[in-house]
């Protein structure tokens, strides 16, 4: 069977539990979490939103991203007792990163699992083909399944993500000694990735809780036009995007599963490969009618693509 690349968006989680996987819901829940954000910290974020209350989605995070960038820059050039920023300004990047990490953790920590038929068909397909998997979301639906079904098993497994016990290593992604493993690429990061001294390590599943305060630099949760800069600032994420190009080059088909089509940095990367690769989109039927969705994807990707629309995409098995 041919090796493929499957790119998963948030649509898989939304098909299983729309309330839990709602980004707006997670942003609001963490915003209102007791003993987390102070009123003054909320006011600083609200000034970036130019309204009161929690952010409602990535589309509102552009000015917030810029404010964090400016605070970091001013923080680097301030010394001694005289400083460009107040204490709140100095702490703003860290508290914002902690807010984002808690939101991603809330989305990640879903207690449910994949439907049996969906999971069995996907796991069997990965094992038969060592096809690559890339994720744009933060949930653990695939991650849990792949651990429980031995997709992840070190170099003896079918997929690897470059994370070793001592931390992330790009060298661990290199195939040696005849290995044929595929790649599991967290394109927009994971709340499991945290800095420890000079290393980026991956927490175990039981270690991740909303209660912990982590100012993660390895989660891409921001306005679309700011995502490339977040990726570039993370050694881990930029390595995954480098390997995405390799995965694209050796895959015979690309499947976009539950992906909105709105991440322009991904679309730009996909376009050059589509003259030589088959591409399928699997999406929720409620996104629009067949003709409208085919036209939409042609605008997004510059090519005609096969669009499969399902009332519930978690019932898909035709990998």
Image: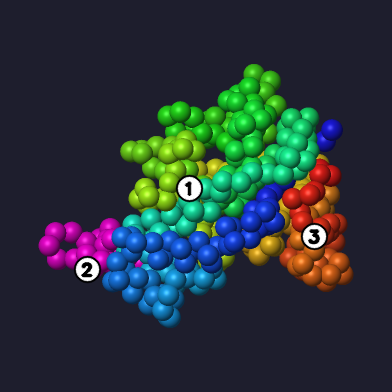
Report which residue position mark 3 lands on. Answer: 311
Asked whether, in this view, residue 245 is left or right of residue 289, the answer is left
10 Å crowding of disc 3: few (<14), some (14-19), many (20+): few
- Relative to 296, does residue 156 appear above or below in the rendering? above
User: Residue drawn at (40%, 66%), measured in percent from left and top?
Assistant: 32
- Please state the horizontal and vertical placement of residue 248, each as a whole percent of the image: 72, 44
User: Front-most of 253 and 52?
Assistant: 52
Which image quadrant is residue 2 in?
Answer: top right
Q: Which residues are magenta?
A: 70-91
Instruction: Tally the marks.
Output: 3
Report which residue position mark 2 lands on. Answer: 86
Q: For residue 179: magenta? A: no
Asked if the residue at tag 1 contacts the one at tag 3, i.e. Cβ–Cβ closer than 8 Å, the answer is: no
- Relative to 165, does residue 82 appear above or below in the rendering? below
Asked if the residue at tag 2 contacts the one at tag 3, i.e. Cβ–Cβ closer than 8 Å, the answer is: no
User: Residue drawn at (55%, 71%), measured in percent from left and top?
Assistant: 59
Quadrant into which the C terminus falls: top right
User: Residue drawn at (39%, 75%), measured in percent from left and top?
Assistant: 46
Which image quadrant is residue 39 in?
Answer: bottom left
Q: Earlier in the sequence, mark 3 or mark 2?
A: 2
Q: Label 3: state its secondary structure.
A: loop
User: Residue drawn at (77%, 33%), measured in percent from left and top?
Assistant: 124
Q: Earlier in the sequence, mark 3 or mark 1?
A: 1
Between label 3 and label 1, give the one nearer the viewer.
3
- Please state the horizontal and vertical placement of residue 297, each as a whole percent of the image: 78, 64
Between label 2 and label 1, give the one nearer the viewer.
1
Q: How is the image coloured?
A: rainbow
Q: Which mark is residue 191?
A: 1
């Amino acid at each position: 069977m041919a090796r493929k690349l499957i790119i998963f968006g948030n649509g898989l989680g939304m098909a299983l539990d729309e309330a839990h996987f709602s980004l707006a819901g997670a942003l609001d829940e963490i915003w209102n979490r007791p003993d987390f954000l102070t009123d003054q910290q909320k006011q600083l974020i609200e000034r970036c939103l130019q309204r009161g209350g929690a952010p409602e989605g990535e589309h509102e995070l552009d000015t917030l991203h810029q404010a964090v960038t400016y605070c970091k820059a001013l923080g680097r050039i301030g010394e001694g007792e005289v400083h460009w920023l107040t204490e709140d300004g100095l702490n703003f990047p860290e508290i914002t990163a902690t807010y984002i990490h808690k939101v991603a953790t809330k989305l990640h920590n879903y207690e449910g699992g994949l439907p049996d038929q969906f999971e069995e068909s996907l796991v069997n397909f990965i094992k038969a083909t060592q096809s690559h998997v890339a994720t744009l979301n933060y949930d653990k639906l695939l991650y849990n399944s792949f651990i429980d079904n031995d997709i992840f098993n070190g170099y003896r497994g079918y997929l690897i993500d470059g994370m070793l016990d001592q931390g992330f290593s790009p060298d661990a992604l290199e195939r040696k000694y005849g290995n044929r493993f595929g790649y599991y690429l967290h394109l927009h990061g994971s709340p499991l990735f945290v800095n420890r001294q000079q290393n980026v390590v991956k927490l175990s599943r039981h270690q991740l809780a909303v209660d912990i305060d982590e100012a993660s630099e390895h989660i891409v949760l921001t306005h679309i036009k700011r995502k490339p800069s977040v990726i570039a600032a993370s050694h881990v994420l930029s390595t995954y995007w480098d390997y995405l190009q390799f995965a694209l080059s050796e895959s015979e088909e690309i499947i976009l599963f539950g992906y909105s089509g709105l991440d322009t940095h991904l679309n730009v990367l996909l376009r050059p490969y589509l003259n030589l690769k088959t591409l399928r989109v699997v999406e929720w039927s409620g996104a629009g009618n067949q003709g409208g969705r085919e036209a939409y994807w042609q605008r997004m990707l510059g090519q005609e693509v096969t669009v499969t629309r399902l009332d519930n995409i978690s019932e898909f098995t035709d990998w």
